[in-house]
Amino acid sequence: MMDNDQKAERYNQLLRMHDKLEERIADIKSDNAGMDLNDQQTAKVREYEQQKLQVIEETRQLFN
């Protein structure tokens, strides 16, 4: 069981991870401004979106 300080530190780590994933997705999309993503880019965006969902779920569990 984590104490509140450990939870706060983990929350900050998860927040940074989420922000990094958002930046990566934005970078991919901005590289193709106005054009469709290719298959490799689409796969990467999906992968990052899945990772974001995992981060969100872990954050939820942190405070339950």
Image (cartoon, rainbow, N blue to C red):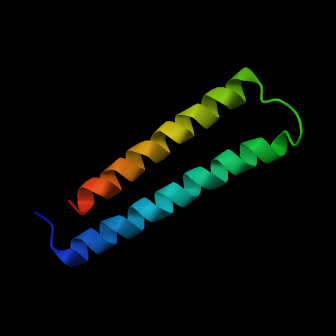
Give the number of callouts: 0
Q: Is residue 58 above or below residue 14?
A: above
Residue at point 68%, 29% (across, down): 42
| 44 left or right of 62 in image | right
Q: Quadrant of residue 3?
A: bottom left
Q: Position of residue 40 (x, y in %)?
A: 69, 25
Which residue is found at the position 32% from the left and 65% from the top?
10
Q: Indicate whether 11 appears above or below 61.
A: below
Task: Note whether 62 is above or below 41 in the view shown.
Answer: below
Left or right, residue 52 beside residue 27: left
Query: Where residue 25 sits: x, y (%)?
Result: 66, 46
Apparent side of residue 29 relative to residue 63 in the rendered image (left or right): right
Q: Nearer the viewer, residue 64 or 18?
A: 64
Image coordinates of residue 29 in percent, x first then y, are: 76, 43
Picture residue at 40% right of the left edge, 50% below the top:
55
- On the rendered image, what quadrant is the C terminus found in? bottom left
Identify the image quadrant of the N terminus: bottom left
Whether residue 1 sits left or right of residue 17 in the image: it is left
**Residue at left 58%, top 32%?**
46
Residue 22 place in picture, x, y as percent: 61, 53
Residue reaching furthest to the right: 34
